[in-house]
Structures are given as C-alpha cells and as structure tokens.
Amino acid sequence: MEAPNTLDAARRQFQGDDYAVIPDVWTKAEVQQAIDALDALVDDIRTHPLRWQEHVVWQSDVPERQLTGIPQALRAAAATQPYIIGDLASHSVVLRRMILDERCRRMAEALLDTESVCHFSNATIRAANGGCACNWHRDWPNSYCTTHTGRQLRILICLDGMHAEQGATRIIRGSQHWNEQQFNTWKQEEHPWDETGHAVTCSPGSVVVLGSRIVHGAGNNLSAVPRRNLIAQWGAQKDLICAQVFESVLGLTD
Ligand SMILES: O=C(O)CCC(=O)C(=O)O
C-alpha cells in the first residue's frame, strides 16, 4: 500500500472498471486487533440486543429470499446472526481509528482525485455457514447518505478476505455505464447472486473500493469462514451531502 505504484495501479483499475482491489493495506496485527474489537461488539450485541436496536440489522431482518440460498437445516441459526452494525465508528475506538485512518483518506483522494471526507461506516458480517446474500444495487444515489454528484465511493476493509464461496462482493462489469432504465430492465430479469457477474476476491487485510455506479451484490456465505468487512463511504469534500441520519464520522477526515 505504501508504494506509490500501488495507488497508481488502483487508480487505473478504478478509472476503467469503477472498482479496485488494493492488497495488503492492513497488517496481520491490525486485522487481528479489528477482529477482536468486532468480536467484542458482537458479544455485547448478543448480550444486550435491545440496547443495539437502533444500530443493528439482523439476518432475520432481511427479505427472506436473501436467505434461501442457505441450506434449510442452517437457516434458523443464520437468522440469529447480526448482519450490519451501523455507525460502527461510534462503538469502538479501534474501529473508528481504522475507518478514519490516513490510508482510507489517501485511497479515497487518489481514486476520486479530490479532497475527500468520510460519510459513514458500518460492519457488514456474512456469518460462516449461512451469511445472507445482498441484492443487486448501486451505491449512488442512495436514500441513506449521498452526495449530489456521485463523487463518492465505498471502502471495504476485508478482515477475512473474500472468496466466492464466502459470498464475495460480485460486480457486473461495464454496468457503471448503464443508464437507470438499462439497470432497471436488467434488474427485472433473474440474476442469481452466486453465479452472475464477477466475484471480487482478495486476501485478509485487503481493501476493495467500489465506485458509486457499479452494479453489485453478494451471494450467501456457505463456507465455514465468516466474511467480515468494515465499510466506509468517503466522498468529495466540496460536494453537498444529503443524509437521513447523523453518523459520528460525517464530514471528518481523521
Ligand atoms: O457486502 C458487500 O459485499 C458489499 C457491500 C455493499 O453492497 C455496499 O456497501 O453497498
């Protein structure tokens, strides 16, 4: 990551494909520290679910079709797993540091080619032996927190790496050029999450950056390994942001 070539290569990939994979951004020790911090949050969520109501989406909260790829015998257990922890940075000093780390700002600024600020953060957990799938979508515009221009991106800090059978993010190559009508027409057809498009794979400690127009989704995690990503949206500092909810990192750079 420190080598300027790494960011140059990522910028070139991002310009052509609207996504990029940046290997080895975080050391093994940093990844382990983040996993420990996340495990502590999950323990607390399980112990005090009511306290977390506002910030946790459980796998039981997602539309049922996102669980139907999971074998029937595992589905009830899958429903009891936390899926998304919102405003992640507000719950852990360790994870906040990572979301606002200099490396995230540098990646955002290199790929967006402008000064950038953080918008929001979450942890997206696809549990081992039954992580839910994610519907095809684009990140811009979105109803949660969006710039008015689309000069924004998602930084996925992949703690476990991503393999296809773990429910890796899948992208549809070239879809960043589709207009809304093309996207809507495509969406109306059946596109199985675990077979369509290209699975974006990477090793633990890598970052996957998703541009705001690339159509993406994810299959179920049917492997014995969890697939945990810390996700931050960053965007152009100059752009107006429309946010539905106040997030603790909104507008910050460190
Ligand atoms: O979990 C993933 O694979 C991607 C997350 C995602 O779709 C998003 O942040 O928009």
Image (tube, grey):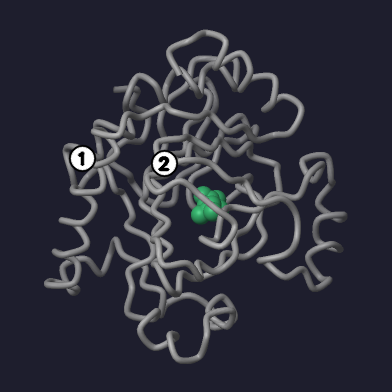
Horizontal side, residue 122 vs residue 147: left or right: left
The amino acid sitting under disc 1 is Gln
Asked if one can make out residue 205 in the rendered structure from this viewpoint, the answer is: yes
The amino acid sitting under disc 2 is Pro
Q: Nearer the viewer, residue 227 or 112?
A: 227
In the rendered image, which residue does mark 1 sit on?
33
Secondary structure, mark 2, is: loop
Asked if one can make out residue 143 in the rendered structure from this viewpoint, the answer is: no
Residue 89, how many percent across, how many down? Answer: 26, 42
Few, some or many residues within 10 Å of mark 2 (<14, 14–19, 20+)? many
Q: What residue is drawn where x is 18% and y is 72%?
A: 46
Q: Quadrant of the N terminus?
A: top left
Few, some or many residues within 10 Å of mark 1 (<14, 14–19, 20+)? some
Between the C-alphas of marks 1 and 2, the distance is: 13 Å
Residue 150, how many percent across, how many down? Answer: 64, 35
Q: Quadrant of residue 7?
A: top right
Residue 182, how many percent across, how many down? Answer: 87, 54
The vertical placement of 4 against 212, above or below, is above
Please report whichever mark, 1 or 2, sits nearer to the chain's N-terminal start.
1
Q: What residue is drawn where x is 86% and y is 55%?
A: 181
The vertical placement of 154 against 39, above or below, is above
In the rendered image, which residue does mark 2 sit on?
204
